[in-house]
Image (cartoon, rainbow, N blue to C red):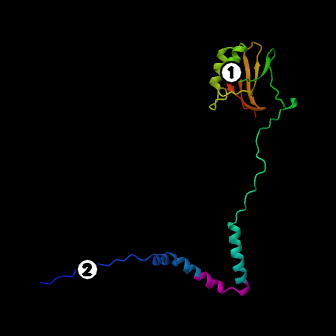
């Protein structure tokens, strides 16, 4: 009876140095080809390239330090509009214009009650309100301009913040429509 030898393959993993050598081989080949190509240049050109390429790489990677900020900017600046810059809004014959600056806690509903305007007009305004809800997000300090017609009904409503028109509504029959004021 013959005994067969078991064949065991001795699979050794390559060492770290061998793996590094294998990984960097394409880069080293490319560097060798580059040096061979540089050898074909005249001596003066090789010298210039050996100085300019590292200088260019340094400049490419250099990031200047940002300037230190002086005094931090805080606060706000309010620039009032002169009377000449105020918008001219047509008032119907027999109507009147109401300019009002919202106080803390005031709502459009409370103002309609104070000025004795019909609640159905407030409902019509809310129906015409765009998706960003300017009527629901009124804030103290915003300015309202209302124009009433001769019957005492609301004809036009404009909401401004620091002179900038946020939104405006104009009567269109029994309903209101949002107006482009630009």
Q: Residues within 10 Å of mark 2 (few under 14, many from 20)?
A: few
**Counting residues from the N terminus, which is met first, the one under dot 2 or under dot 1?**
2
Residue at left 34%, top 77%? 11
Q: Is residue 70 above or below residue 51?
A: above
Nearer the observer, 106 or 155: 106
- In which quadrant of the rendered view does residue 139 lie? top right
Most common secondary structure along the magenta stretch: helix
Badge 1 marks a residue whose secondary structure is helix
Asked if disc 2 and disc 1 are in contact, CB closer than 8 Å, the reply is no
Tell me which corner region of the image, top left, top right, bottom left or bottom right, holds residue 126.
top right
In this orientation, which residue lies closer to the viewer: 143 or 177? Answer: 143
Q: Which residue has dot 1 on it?
A: 108
Label ID, residue 88: none
* Depicted 168 relative to depicted 93: above or below: below
First to last magenta residue range:
32-44
Is 165 located above or below residue 17 in the figure? above
Point out the residue furthest to the left here.
Answer: 1
Residue 174 visible in the shown view: no
Q: Which picture quadrant has residue 142?
A: top right
* Residue 31 can be seen in this image: yes
Can you tell which mark lies on residue 7?
2
Q: Judge the density around disc 1: few (<14), some (14-19), many (≥20) Cα neighbours within 10 Å.
A: some
Residue 58 in the magenta stretch? The answer is: no
Q: CA distance from mark 2 to mark 1?
A: 94 Å
Please name the residue shown 71% across and 68% down the image.
Answer: 59
Residue 175: x and y, percent? 66, 21
Q: Residue 33: percent from the left, percent from the top?
A: 59, 82
Write the residue at 75% across / 54% down: 68
Camera-side residue of 39 and 59: 59
């Amino acid at each position: 009876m013959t005994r067969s030898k078991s064949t065991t393959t001795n699979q050794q993993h390559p060492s770290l140095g061998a793996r590094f050598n294998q990984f960097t081989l394409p880069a080293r080949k490319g560097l060798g080809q580059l040096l061979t190509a540089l050898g074909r240049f005249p001596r003066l050109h090789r010298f210039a390239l050996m100085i300019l390429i590292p200088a260019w790489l340094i400049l490419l990677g250099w990031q200047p330090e940002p300037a230190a900020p002086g005094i931090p900017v805080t606060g706000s600046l309010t620039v009032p509009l002169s009377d000449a810059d105020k918008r001219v809004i047509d008032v119907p014959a027999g109507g009147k214009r109401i300019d009002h600056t919202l106080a803390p806690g005031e709502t459009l509903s409370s103002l309609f009650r104070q000025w004795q305007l019909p609640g159905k007009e407030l409902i019509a305004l809310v129906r015409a309100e765009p998706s960003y809800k300017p009527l629901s997000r009124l804030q103290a300090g915003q300015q309202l301009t209302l124009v009433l017609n001769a019957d005492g009904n609301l004809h036009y409503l404009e909401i401004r913040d620091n002179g900038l028109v946020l939104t405006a509504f104009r009567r269109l029959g029994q309903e209101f429509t949002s107006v482009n004021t630009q």
